[in-house]
Image: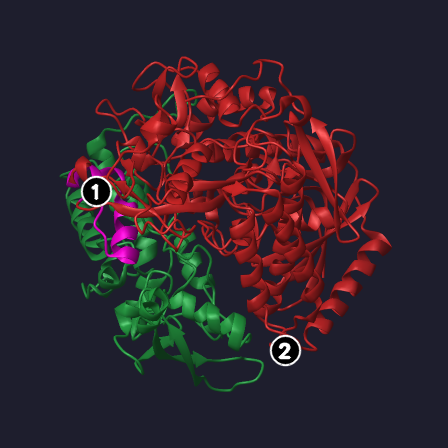
Chain colours: A green, B red
Amino acid sequence: MKDDRKKDLRMNITLDIQRFDPERDTEPRRQAYEVDVQPTDRVLDALMHIARHVDGTLAFRKSCAHGVCGSDAMRISGKERLACKTLIRDVAKKDGDVISIDPLNHMTVQKDLMVDQSVFLSKFRAVEPFLKPRKPLPFSSEFYQSPEDRAIIDEATKCINCGACYSACPVLDENPDFLGPAALVAAVRFVFDSRDEGLAARLDIVDQQNAVWSCDNHFECTKVCPREIKITKLINLTKRTIKKYKEGETDA
Amino acid sequence: MRFDYDAVIVGAGGAGLYAALEASGAGKTAVITKLYPQRSHTGAAQGGISAALGNVEEDSPEWHAFDTVKGGDYLVDQNAAIILAEEAVRAVFDLENRGLPFSRTPEGKIDQRRFGGHTRDFGAAAVRRSCYAADRTGHMILQTLYQQCIKNDVAFHDEWQVVDVVMDGTLLTGLVVFELSTGELHLVSAKAVLFATGGFGRMFKVTSNAMANTGDGPALLSRAGVPLMDMEFFQFHPTGIRTMGILITEGVRGEGGILLNRDGYRFMEKYAPTMMDLAPRDMVSRAIMTEIAEGKGIKGDRKIDDWVHLDASHLGRETVEAKIPDIADFCRTYLGVDPAVEPMPVQPTAHYAMGGIPTDLDGRVTDGKRTWDGLYAAGECACVSVHGANRLGTNSLVELIVFGRRAGNTIAKYVGTATSVNPGRAGDDKIKAWKDRIIGLKKGGAHSGKTYEAMQETMMANVGVYRNEGAMQNAVDDIAGLRDSYTEIGVQDQDSNYNTEVLSILELENLLDLSLHTSAAALARTESRGAHSREDYPDRDDKNWLKHSLSNIVGGKVILDSKPVDVSRWEPKPRVY
C-alpha cells in the first residue's frame, strides 16, 4: 500500500535546459529532459539524476544541497533561485509540466549552467570586505558589541554570494560597471559594524556613481535573494547615511 | 603546466584558510580548492564553536578537555584534547577580533549556549560553552577567514582538483592537479603541502554533507601509502531532516528543544538521565534508533527510515527566529513545517568522519613510526585525534581553527629552512599516467549513478548507527564488488573544458576507497566504542581495543595496524551521562 501511495506522488515533468558548449556550439541551444520526480524533490535532485544516469555532459555547479554554499544559483522558470532550495512543487504542479532552466544573467556562460563569476567576485573583493577596526584590537580578549549594534548588521552578514541578485538586477543590463547588489551588501555589512571605522573609511567605495547611486530601486535583488536579505532597503539606508554624513549630521 | 610554491594549502574551508593566513607570510603560498572560496562545507556548520570563556557561567578549559575525552569514549589523545580546549579560548578571541559577528550577551560579550556532552565540573550538568552566531556560526567563520584572505592577498587557484601526490620515499615532492576550466593536468611542487579537504559523508545515503565532501585528500594519500586512522568511527548526527539528511543543529536542543517519540514521550530521560537531550551525539542517535526498532518511531513500522520528533515549539516564535532562524527556514522550505508551531521530523544523518589522515599535534602526517616530510593535514580530513570514537558538537570548528593555525605555523617555520623539492621524472610519469587515464575514461562506459547509489545504500544499511558482523561483511563485499566494476564506468563528455563528469567519477573512486577503509576497519573492531556500536559486541573492550586503528588497502584488501592512544591525564572510565 505504501509503495502505491508513493507512486501516486511521483510526477513526470520536463526540464527544458539551456545548453551551450563553447567547444562545439556557436549558439546556445535548448535540450529537454523528461524526469520522474516527487513534488518534494529539489530541482537539484533532478539535475543530479540527469548527470549521473542520463546525460553526463550536462554541466552545472553544486555543493551543499541545502541553500548555504551559493554554488547552484540559476534561473528556474524565469526567476533566479538556488536549485537546491527550490522544490519541484514550487515550479511544477502536475505531470507534463515544463520547468525551464537557464544560466544566470550578467555573467558569461562557460558551459551549460556554469557562468564566469570572476567579474562578479572581483567586485566583491573591490569593496574591501574585511573589518577595519576603529580602535586597536584587544587580541587576548573581546571587542565588545552590544546586541543592538550586532542586530544592525545581521541581514548583511547572511549573504552567501550566490549571484542571484546580480543576475536579476536590471541596472546591470545597462551599466555593466555597476558594483551590483551583492558587493554593496558586503560593503554595507562593514559600514554599519560598530567595531569598524565604518563609512568614514569606506566613503570612497560606496559613495560612487557605480556603487550605491546606480541603484534605481527596482527591488528585483530583494525579490530573488535566497537568503531573504532586504538588499534594496540596505542600499537606501546607505544612501541616506552618506547624505547625512556629508551634511555633517552624523559621525558614522 | 608546472607551478612551484613554498607552501600549498589544499582546501579552502576553515582549516585551510586559517593555515593559509598563517603560512602565507613565510613564503610563496597558494590555496588550491576544487570549489570557489566561500563554497566550502565549513559554511554549513550551524550551532557554535566551544571555548571555555566563562562569559555566562563558570567554565574551564580543563572541563572542556575532559568532556572531549569522555565524549570520544577515551579514544581521544588526551594531550591533543588539552591543547584543543586551552587554545580554543584564544582561537575564538582571534576570530572575533577579525570581525566575526558573534551573537552577544546584553553586556556585549560573546554569548554562549549549551551543547551535547559539554558539562561543568566533569559531568555535573550542562554548561554554556558554545560561542555562536545564531545558527550560522560556520558561515560566519568561513566568511571572516575569506575576508582576511582578501585583506592579506592570499593567492587562490579555484576549481583545481588535486588528484595525486608525487612522493620520494616519505618526502612529498609534488601534486598532480586537474584544472576544471581547461582539463589541463598541472604538476605543482611545494616544500610543504597541507591537506584540508574536509569530510566524506557522501559515502552514505542520508547525510548532512555537501556533494563536494568526497574525501579526496585521505583517499589519494591512502593510495600513495599513507595509512588512515580510526576510519571505523563515523558520526551520525541525531537530528537530520527526515530523508534528506539536512542538518538541524544540536543548538536547537541547547536552546531547550526536546526529542519525542510517537507517544509524545521525552525518551532521552531513559537513556541519559542527567544530560537527557544534550547527551553526546552517538548516544542520542542510538536512542532514536532503539525507539524506532521498538516501534516508537512516528511511523511505527520499526524500519530504519522511520523518524522521531524534535520539538522546539514551546520555545516560542521570538526564540526560534532569533536563535535558529536558518533551521526555521530549512524546515519551512523542505518540509512545510514551522518549528515555532509544530515539531520537526528528524532521523540520524551521516555527519562527520572522526577518522582520517593521521597527524601529530602540529599537523605533520605521521603513523607513529614514520613521519612524511613536507606533508601536513588539518580539519575533518585529519585525525589528530581530538575526537576519538565520537566528536562532541562544536569541536569540529574548534579543531579547524586550533589545528589549522598550528599546522600553518609549523609550515611557516618549515619552509624557511627546508630545501626546494623536485618531483623530477616521477612527476612527469604521473602526469603522463593521468593523461592516459582521462583519455581512457573518455572511451566511454557505464554511467556512474548506479555505483554511487549502491555504495550509499550498502554503507547506510550496513555500517550505520548499529552494526553487526554479518551486515558489515556484506558492506565489505558490496564495496569490493563496486570497486571491481568501477573500471566499467566511463564518461560521455568529451570536452576538455569544464568536464564535471570526469571530476565526479574521480570523486566516486575516492568515496569507494574510503568506504572500504570504513567498513573493513569497523568489521575488525570487535567492541562497541563511541559511534562504533555493535550488536554482537555491545561493550567497550579497553584491554584489547584501547588503540587507534591504521588501515591500508593492499591488493583490494584492507590491512590493519594500530597506534597507541595518549591516556596520560584521565584514566578511562565507564561513560555515563
Amino acid type, residue under disc 1 in the picture = Glu
Q: Along the horizontal axis of the image, is A28 left or right of B320? A: right
Write down the quadrant of residue A3 in the picture.
Answer: bottom left
Rate crowding at label 2 as few (under 14), some (14 to 19) or many (20 or more) other CA atoms within 10 Å: some
Q: Residue at x 50, y 22 (%)?
A: B70
Please state which of residues B118 and B38 is positioned toward the viewer in this rendering.
B118
Mark linked to residue B494: 2
Rate crowding at label 1 as few (under 14), some (14 to 19) or many (20 or more) other CA atoms within 10 Å: some
Secondary element type, mark 2? loop
User: Does the segment drawn in magenta span residue B326?
Assistant: yes
Q: Which residue corresponds to mark 1? A: B321
Q: Along the horizontal axis of the image, is B392 left or right of A207? A: right
Q: Please, what is the dominant secondary structure of the magenta stretch?
A: helix
Ranked by sequence position, the earlier of labels 1 and 2 is 1
Distance CA(mark 1)–CA(mark 2):
48 Å
Q: Chain of mark 1?
A: B
Q: At which x and y percent is residue B195? A: 63, 43
Q: Which residues are magenta?
A: B317-340
Q: At which x and y percent is residue B421? A: 79, 44
Q: Residue at x 60, y 58 (%)?
A: B160
Which image quarter is the N terminus of chain B in? bottom right
Figure check: B555 above or below A80 = above
Task: Kindly check if marks 1 and 2 are in contact, taking CB atoms under 8 A apart as contact.
Answer: no
The tally of labels here is: 2
Amino acid type, residue under disc 2 in the picture = Gln
